[in-house]
Amino acid sequence: MNVLTLVHGRRGHLLNMIRGLEQSTVPPAALVIVQMNETPFRWESSRFPIVHCALDSGDDKLPLAAARNAAVDNAPGDDLVFLDVDCVPAPDLMAAYRDKLALSKNVLYQGEVLYLPSALENTETAMDLFAQYGAPHPLHVGRCSGETVPHALFWSLNFACQRETFEQIGRFDTQYRGYGAEDTDFGFRAAETGVPIEFIQARAFHQFHPSFDPPLNHLTSIVANARLFRARWGFWPMDGWLTQFANAGYIEMDDEAIVLRRMPTRIEIAAALR
């Protein structure tokens, strides 16, 4: 099995991911790292090879969809495990995915993600502490292994599939540029092509990092990607963020269109940092 991840900055988090994979009961055949919009940097592991790729969008919008596709193109095998760079895999994550992929091929397997508190921000891969203090996302509290996940709740933080399934779905759509909606679109196209999503206990721990709420730093990307998603699927994604943007006067929106009214100031963006 190949592990695929994308990185821009976050070298410390990526190093913790590598350390976590080195503790895995089933090490990956290879780790594929796609560096986005940054100077190439090389990592090494004594337990598995690391494949390095670089992708530059030519602007400040991270090419997330294109980078995931590039990771698949550079993976040396057909069993694909996608992990967000902020995720540290539990020792049995790879074994859980291996067993499921061997049983049923035409499925997206979505693993569990537990979010770590800021107090553990600089802690190395202490799995006992991670398991004690990690908390599930509110939308995934109480999920059981084998449960079907609604396609609208697909996320790309921690999932696995076979290359054939990835191609059947149609890969990630590179028309989405920058932050927002590319993984939701992937989930809806999985539904359209008859690929179910199954939740399994393949646990990863999401390392803490500051974030923007709402993500004013990604306003233009979110608006552009929301328009693309609305044109394809007939409704607005990321409606919570869009509503916050509208209430603050950055955009106007109705059922059919979004109009960008003004950009946030640096002070407003800084104030949204949590």
Image (cartoon, rainbow, N blue to C red):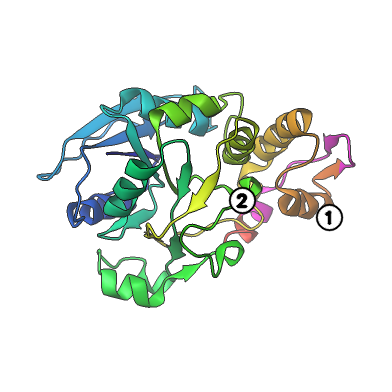
- Residue 247: give x, y in percent of width and height: 84, 55
Name the residue at 31% across, 75% down: 129
Name the residue at 18% across, 57% down: 23
| Residue situated furthest bottom in the rendering | 132
| Residue situated furthest left in the rendering | 46
How many angstroms separate mark 1 from mark 2 (CA)?
A: 25 Å
Q: Is residue 246 left or right of residue 130?
A: right
For label 2, the SS is: helix
- Residue 134: give x, y in percent of width and height: 42, 71
What is the magenta range? 253-269
Counting residues from the start of the chain, the first of labels 1 and 2 encountered is 2
For label 1, the SS is: helix
Is residue 268 one of those drawn in magenta? Answer: yes
Residue 88's tag is: none
Is residue 255 one of those drawn in magenta? Answer: yes
Residue named by callout 2: 153
Residue named by callout 1: 247
Name the residue at 42% across, 27% down: 164
Q: Is 37 in front, or is 114?
A: 114
Dot 1 alpha-carbon crowd within 10 angstroms: few under 14, some 14 to 19, many 20 or more: few
Q: In the image, what residue type sits under mark 1?
A: Asn
Question: Within the image, what quadrant is residue 256 found in?
Answer: top right
